[in-house]
Each structure stands twice: as C-alpha cells, then as structure tokens.
Amino acid sequence: MAIDDSREFQPLNIAVITLSDTRTEENDRSGQTLVQLAQTAGHKIVLKHIIPDEIDGIVGLLNTLCDDPNIDIVLCTGGTGLTKRDVTPEAFQQVVDKDIPGFGELFRMLSHDHIGTSTLQSRATAGLSRGTFLFALPGSTGACKDAWNFILKEQLDIRHRPCNFAELLPRFAGTPHARKSGTKLR
C-alpha cells in the first residue's frame, strides 16, 4: 500500500457532476472541492456540470459521458440520500455494466469515523460502464473530501500498489475507453 516511484504519474480525464435542484456554480462547494482535489493531484478536469435530480436527465448525461472518448472518470456528488429526490444510485443502476460494491462499503466504513452511524443514510456507490469509472458521492463537502483522500486519490493514481483503478483503464478493449486518445497508461 504505497506509491511506486519507479512509475510515472499518469493524469486522468475527469468529469465532475453535481446532482442537485438547489446548487449553482456560486454555491456548489462539493463539486468545487472535487475539482480542486483532482487538479491538485495532477488530473485534468474536462467537464464540471450541475444537473437537477431528475433520473432521466442523469441517465442521459451519464450515458453521454461514458461514450465520450475524452473522459476516464465521472465523479458525481449529490443525490445519494434517502429522500424522494435522491435518485443517483437508481440512475447508476441503469448505466453501470459492473458494480464496484466495495467502494460504497469502504466509504461508509471510513465515513463512520467522522459522522458515526449517520453514514447509514449514504448510498454512495460506484461502477464501470463501457470502460469509464463512475463514482456517486454524497453532496456534502466532508463526504467528498473523505472519498477523495481515503479512496479515490490512491485508486486513480497508477503508481499506487498493489493495484489501482487507473491501471485497469487500458484493459477495456472494445469500449469507448479503449479509443480514448488522452490516456496513455502503462
């Protein structure tokens, strides 16, 4: 569980999507936090967008992003709670080819250290669709920081050992990701 300095860092192309009926560019602290954390780590933000909590719109946007050869990772913030308007996990179910159940489990375990049993109200999830990794995070800034600092920062760094998500990207032959020109991972 360390960074292998013999490997060169490879930046990934990331889309950050805020799912909310109330957020604007001026008050979208969670989306802005994810952009800042990803850029500080050396990744490229190719899109930042805010979309309402409408399942059809979310599914359509996720499908478009997964078909885009210039996007490796989609980080979504918001819509993972339990209210009627929280539909991000349901949208993910319509788009994801393979679930990554360990992401949500690990996120809730780590989140417990900060918010206790309230972590049960998070339906953070992740999956893979057509060679693109999708992550659904809660809409709080603290949750986004926890997910990035304790999971995503390492898993999106090709130098992280013993394994990481970044090194899997070139293996998705026949997917839109296999054609992504901006990603030259070794």
Image: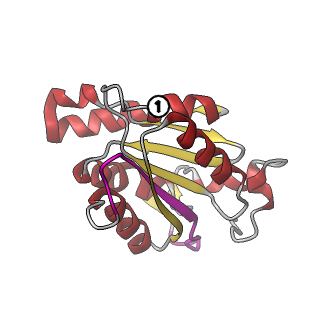
Provide the residue span drawn in magenta: 5-24
Residue that numbered label 1 is attached to: 89
Does the segment drawn in magenta span residue 174? Answer: no
**Is 7 or 182 nearer to us in this picture?**
182
Residue 170 lies, in percent from the top left, at: 73, 56
Left or right relative to 33: residue 176: right
Residue 127 lies, in percent from the top left, at: 56, 37
Total numbered labels: 1
Three-letter code, disc 1: Pro
Please identify the quarter of the rendering in which residue 70 is found: bottom right
Q: Is the magenta stretch mostly helix, strand or loop?
A: loop
Residue drawn at (37%, 38%) of the image: 79
Residue 63 lies, in percent from the top left, at: 66, 45
Residue drawn at (36%, 46%) of the image: 20
Vertical comparison of 126 with 163: above or below: above
User: Considering the numbered disc 1 on the image, is that residue within a helix, a strand or a loop?
Assistant: helix
Residue drawn at (35%, 46%) of the image: 21
The C terminus sits in image quarter: bottom right
Residue 136 lies, in percent from the top left, at: 44, 42
Residue drawn at (72%, 44%) of the image: 130
Left or right relative to 26: residue 126: right
Residue 49 seen: yes
**Is 171 or 119 nearer to us in this picture?**
119
